[in-house]
Amino acid sequence: MHRSLRSKKISSTKLGAILTGGALALAFPMLAAADVSAIDAAARSVQPRMIEWRRHLHANPELSNREVKTADFIAKKLEAMGLEVKTGIGHTGVAALLKGGKPGRTVGLRADMDALPVTEQTDVPFKSNVTSEFRGEKVGVMHACGHDAHVAILLGVAEALVKMKDSLTGQVLFVFQPAEEGPPEGERGGALYMLEQGLFDIAKPDVMLGLHVMASLNTGEIGYKPGPMMAGSDYFKVVVTGVQTHGSRPWAGIDPITVSGQILTGLQTIVSRQIDITHVPAVITVGAIKGGIRFNIIPDTVEMVGTIRTFDRDMRDDIIKRMQATASNIAEASGAKAEVTVRDEVSIPPVVNDAELTSRALPLFEQVAGKENVKLIGLQTVAEDYSFFGTKVPSLFFWIGITPRDKDPATVPFNHSPLFYLDEAGMLTGVRAMLTLTTDFLAK
């Protein structure tokens, strides 16, 4: 049925480029002991306020493109530090520029700030009780991915760097980004939208740095990977149209629920049986199915939404074609119709770390966390729209562990869980890493 859609092989040359990333000749020698001590002291000095900020944000989460109070909170903190602040970039995005005592390079630092439609089930005293509307339904809202910690970490880095600005050569662009989890349907948002609205007109970085707290690492650990690290992501929708009828007389209509079940099964065979995943992995996941309203009525439509995760553009395009053919042909066999649409405006490329930058940053990670706590990770099928910054300038993205040392990261709830728990001690590692990388890069 799909012979005309044969999987395209990735050439060894192209694969090599994918797996190594670009090269950037930057110097990252080891910092002097005095510098390490000063950075550690600066990080520890902001730690109490950083925890306070994080808890406030955790108790007051806002969904993507709705981070109005969050943006106001961030802007006021930055202004109190004496920074020049610009708001409203990409809807609710905030940026600030710190100029050092002497001209030089520019480092961009990014934190995302949106929460998720998740009802919190932890028992922390600053637990979120916020509710909102998402896709027409009332939902709980929670910082189940740790973006509250990202904001607090970057605010802490900003405060520490402001105090040492006279000794800095160059400047730092602080970026607080909305809608990393994806803007609502019909809206623009996220990293790409901030770039389109002139974020880098403020100052174009020579290098961009970002981090993410992860439950898959213990507190004090840093995860890194040169080249491709996190997958590209696409949002898809499948609408199956049948003919409504009484549930007792299915032959009088066309049941889109049954057809949707067959399509769901068919989509899974694309990755398992049609795509050569020995090159790079791929994932197709249906995350929600909605159809019908009553037990004895076969509805006329069913809607499925989900995500595609890939590391290669050709493979991504091939999978989409196969999905469209699979859904259409299965539906046609039952007299129904199926339409697969992919929201190109929220398509996210893979996170690709500049290989040379990552290599030269490695000894700095080891300084911050200790060699035994710096982990080389494999390809990750989670996605991050931070990747758009990496399409404009050399970029490095890394992970910070936040699972307590007495817990096994393999068994705790992962990011996006209503039970997601963040050990706030891990935030100190994030601040120290960001300060170390930033000051070292600016000094060269």
Image (cartoon, rainbow, N blue to C red):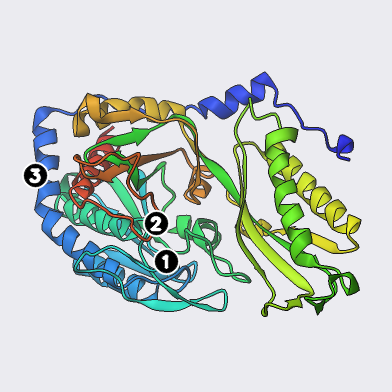
> What's the mark number on residue 41?
3
**Nearer the observer, 336 or 179:** 336
On the rendered image, what quadrant is the N terminus found in? top right
Q: Residue at x 35, y 76 (%)?
A: 130
Mark 3 crowdedness (10 Å alpha carbons): few <14, some 14-19, many ≥20: few
Task: Identify the residue shown where x is 53% and y is 78%.
Answer: 137
Q: Residue furthest top?
A: 12
Q: Nearer the N terminus, badge 2 or badge 3?
A: 3
Nearest to the eye among marks 3 and 1: give it. Answer: 1
Q: Residue at x 63, y 71 (%)?
A: 186
Query: Label 1: which residue?
Result: 118
Lower sequence index among marks 2 and 1: 1
Q: Position of residue 92 (x, y in %)?
A: 43, 71
Disc nearest the viewer among 2 and 3: 2
- Report x, y in % for residue 36: 13, 34
Seen at 8% across and 32% down, the residue is 34
Task: Answer with the quarter of the image where residue 77 lies.
Answer: bottom left
| Mark 2 → mark 1, Cα distance in angstroms | 8 Å
Inspect this view and state whether residue 385 appears.
Answer: yes
The amino acid on which the numbered mark 3 sits, given as a three-letter code, is Ala
Instruction: Name the amino acid type tagged 1.
Output: Val
Task: Check contact, mark 2 vs mark 1: CB within 8 A.
Answer: yes
Residue type, mark 2 in image: Ser
Image position, residue 138 (x, y; %): 48, 79
Say which residue label 2 marks: 417
Q: Secondary structure at mark 2?
A: loop
Q: Nearer the viewer, residue 100 or 9?
A: 9
